[in-house]
Amino acid sequence: MAATTAGEVDERLAHRGPIQQLLTRPEIGALLGLAGVWLLFWLTSEAFGTVGGTANYLDVAALLGIMAVPVALLMIGGEFDLSSGSMTGATAVFVILMSREVGELGGAGFSLHLAVPLSLCFALAIGWFNGTLVERTSLPSFIVTLGTFFILIGAKLGFGKLFTNKVIVEGLDDARGYVFWDDIFGAEWIRNSHVWDGRDWAWAGLLVAAGVTLLIGLFEMSYARRVDSHPWHAARGLVGALVAPLFGFVMLLRTDGTAANWTWGGVIAVGTLSGVAVWCKARYEPAQHTRRRPDARAVRMLVIGIVAIVAAVVLVLVMSAENSGQLGFLGGGLGRAVFGFGIAATGVLAVLAATGRVRTSAPVIGVVVALLPTISYMMTIQGARAVLFAGLAGTGVLILTMVGTRTQPSMWIPMAVAVAVAVLAFVAQSEAESRKLRVELFSTLLLVALALAALAVARSLAQRRTSAVPAPESGAWTRIGAAAGGAATAVFGIIELVDGDGFLYALTTGAAKGAVVAMGIYAVGTLYRMLFTADEGVGRGLMYVGLAAGGLALASKLLFITAAEAEATQAVTRFRVSVLFYLLFAAAGAWMLARTRFGSWTFAVGGNKEAARSIGVPAARTKTTLFMLVSVCAWVAGMLIAFRLNSVQANVGDGLEFRYIIVAVVGGNLLTGGYGSAIGAAIGALIWGMISQGIGFAHWNTDWRFLVLGGLLVVAVIVNNYVRQRAERSQSHVVDEGEPPPEPPPPEPEAAMTGGQS
């Protein structure tokens, strides 16, 4: 094999920035969809963005996500399980029949301490049966699990009517051992019972800590550290960077009034930008400024971006915010004629495209023509105003951001993007009527503008990295944090049990407090390594700390209530234990795929089973284990359903397997196997929950929900396919942003004469 020349870079060692890495992840399409769906319903509904609304869509997403994660793993392994939906209901029916008292229309009469483990064994047996039959017969898993699907449906209905003479089995709450198992599968967190007056300070402080840590982590992963950097210089730079913004933030919380808000907000903005400049000069190599004329494409994109933003501002000023009438620009007979012409043109162009007479994209013209009168009839002026403003403004900002990446290391275009976002914030505030848009959206857009400006300053002052970011050197701190966290979990869990709390509540609260202790120690160690060591991988550690701080901030806001809020509300907000299982399963699935040998086997057998088997991967055992994993998660979902309702109908879970597959596909998993993400499947479940509940919150006609979900599936598949192709191109082509590689040396005369033989 020829040696790598001096100008070539091994793609495994070449630097790709954190944003570029994120854009090649399989779940990025689902993540962007999640942000878009949340923003849509937050803008159109008052209840959606509240804690109660969040609890509602999390409840829907949790049961779906518990199954979507293992189904995604099975799909990555190259198989399907069409019995996964009916399995959830089958395990629920099984545990109730096993625990009902013996009688003429009774059950087995077992205690739940025996019935629940037996139901788990039943689920494992079904999973083993599916996996073994697929491997031994080489039949498609679609056919095998379709047969299991019908068997389970018939068994649920038949045994249910045999023992109860009804299509519903009930009486779980009368079984022996119910209290113990209900504390596990039927537990709830009642927010109104957990009052914490310091919550808002904790929420704000954790958010600031998360933002600062994520920003510094992004810098550490993007820019080259100074060779002559002294630890105390970095510490002094960090202190200088944080003093003014933190002082402004504290004063902003302690004072009130418009003038004070503007004053201290300005202090935060100026202090942040100055702090970023101080930190970058003390920490990173100075940027190498080169004069580079922007190419014609960049200039065109710049003009288009500016025009889009200006058009968004003009439209929002011209169109009325109070007019709820239809657009009506194509109504009556003309609208019907245009609609009919569009449908006819679509059909004719589709035939011509299929025969090769026109381009394959030509039918889109007919679709657009047909949509014009449809939009005119269905959309109000208010809705069109909001959609056009969001669409044009978002497109303009995105285009300007793309232009900014093509002009390195100029600060002005990225700074112009930040200014554009700030202008949009003021326009939204001046034109909005609801407090949510005038205050919350305005503040969020200003914070986004400040973050973009900080990135622009850093980009103009610091030299970008040219080598890949190594893994963080945090072994000792990780072990200390794990030991302290484990001890804290045991201590706090025992305290909760002594206080008389349930087993799962004690275990969960103890584990949560232990995790906070462990993360605190890890954060201290990360800060120490950043300031006083030469660890180049500390940026990843900072990103972990920032994400953890953001998660804690969100959890404190959702799980606790202040005394003032408790007095002002009569609504009771509950978070069911299914949300906890959902989060745990998503984290476990992601860890298994990324960190374990079994995860590597899963990708291998999904990509090419025979090739994987030829290098020693136990393909049959891996796929059977995946089928059994789906069954175990179906058992968990079945127990959650049974202990929530104490009764189960025979048709529970039937047909849900297609939802699990859809959610996994929305999350970036390929139907052909070998590619995907467990986190993506969990995000897909959250998107489904948001849409299913958000349509009701927005007072839309719920008859349209399947149209929305179907459109979401198509768009998600297209986006995920684009992301996958982009990731493949990124891995196969290394872009060198420096000098072009030197010409390869001419071949040796002797080698040329012999044809280059070695």
Image (tube, helix red, strand yellow):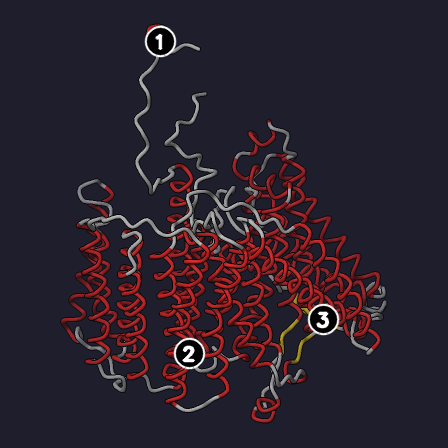
The answer to which image quadrant residue 334 occupies is: bottom left
Circles 1 and 2 in contact, beta carbons < 8 Å: no
Q: Is residue 167 visible?
A: no
Residue type at mark 3: give it: Thr
Image coordinates of residue 598 in percent, x first then y, are 64, 42
Dot 2 alpha-carbon crowd within 10 angstroms: few under 14, some 14 to 19, many 20 or more: some
Q: Can residue 753 be seen in this view?
A: yes
* Quadrant where the N terminus is found in the figure: top left
The answer to which image quadrant residue 751 occupies is: top left
Indicate whether 143 appears above or below 418: above
The mark that comes first in sequence, 1 or 3, is 3
Circles 1 and 3 in contact, beta carbons < 8 Å: no
Indicate whether 516 appears above or below 443: above
Query: Is disc 3 placed on a helix, strand or loop?
Result: helix
The mark that comes first in sequence, 1 or 2, is 2
Residue type at mark 2: give it: Ala
Which of 82 and 243 lies nearest the eye of the viewer? 243
Residue denoted by label 2: 698
Residue denoted by label 1: 755
Residue 700 is labelled as none
Which of 337 and 1 lies nearest the eye of the viewer? 1
Residue type at mark 1: give it: Gly
Residue denoted by label 3: 509
Q: Which of marks 1 and 3 is in front?
A: 1
Indicate whether 95 appears above or below 221: below
Dot 3 alpha-carbon crowd within 10 angstroms: few under 14, some 14 to 19, many 20 or more: some
- Marks 3 and 2, how far apart in space? 35 Å
Image coordinates of residue 101 in percent, x first then y, are 84, 69
Which residue: 32% across, 49% down?
288
